[in-house]
Amino acid sequence: MAYVVIAVCFGLAGGIVGRIKGSSFVLWFLISGAVPFFGLLAAVFYRFERDELRRECPRCHKVVKIHDTLCTRCGMELDFPERVIAPESWERPSPRPQDVAEGGHEAARAGPST
């Protein structure tokens, strides 16, 4: 009974860490629950999905991760690209709709212009 409690706790921790990194909660829950300590370590040291380089499919122009070998939209087999796209984590977040309606958050921070 004690092992089940430990396995569930490690499974939950591994699942949460995996989900934070952009992967599947269920997958990391099962891995961390089956091999409690090492599964959680694997989830902690696993890559962040947002830090992966991306590329564009030449046929349908869908942006996919660089390590994908098939386009998930059209099924085209992808070779190593000549040009890569920066990871999602490098992109600036888009402004919120209320900031755009108010003239942008930069203008609000600048104060009155004289």
Image (cartoon, helix red, strand yellow):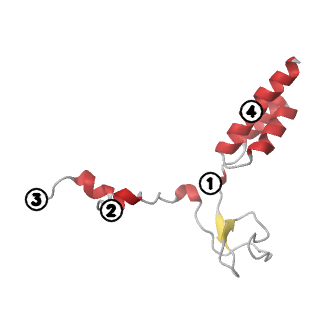
CA distance for labels 2 and 3: 22 Å
Mark 1: few, some, or many residues within 10 Å (few <14, many ≥20)? some
Q: For the N terminus, which image quadrant?
A: top right
Q: For the C terminus, which image quadrant?
A: bottom left
- Which residue is identified by label 2? 101
Looking at the rendered structure, which numbered label has been put on residue 12? 4
CA distance for labels 1 and 4: 22 Å
Q: Looking at the image, do the residues carrying marks 3 and 1 touch, with CB atoms under 8 Å apart?
A: no
Nearest to N terminus: mark 4 or mark 3:
4
Nearest to N terminus: mark 2 or mark 3:
2
CA distance for labels 4 and 3: 56 Å
Nearest to N terminus: mark 1 or mark 2:
1
Nearest to N terminus: mark 1 or mark 4:
4
Tell me the amino acid under the disc marked 2.
Ala
- Report helix, strand or loop for mark 3: loop
Residue 81, horizontal then vertical, whole percent: 70, 74
Q: Which quarter of the picture shows residue 54?
A: bottom right
Tell me the amino acid under the disc marked 1.
Arg
- Report helix, strand or loop for mark 2: helix
Please indicate whether residue 64 sits to the left or right of residue 99 in the image: right
- Which residue is identified by label 3? 114
Q: Which quarter of the picture shows residue 32?
A: top right
Nearest to N terminus: mark 3 or mark 1:
1
Q: Nearer the viewer, mark 2 or mark 4?
A: 2
| 30 in relation to 4, above or below | below
Name the residue furthest left: 114
Tell me the amino acid under the disc marked 3.
Thr
Mark 3: few, some, or many residues within 10 Å (few <14, many ≥20)? few
Q: Looking at the image, do the residues carrying marks 1 and 2 touch, with CB atoms under 8 Å apart?
A: no
Q: Looking at the image, do the residues carrying marks 1 and 4 touch, with CB atoms under 8 Å apart?
A: no
Tell me the amino acid under the disc marked 4.
Leu
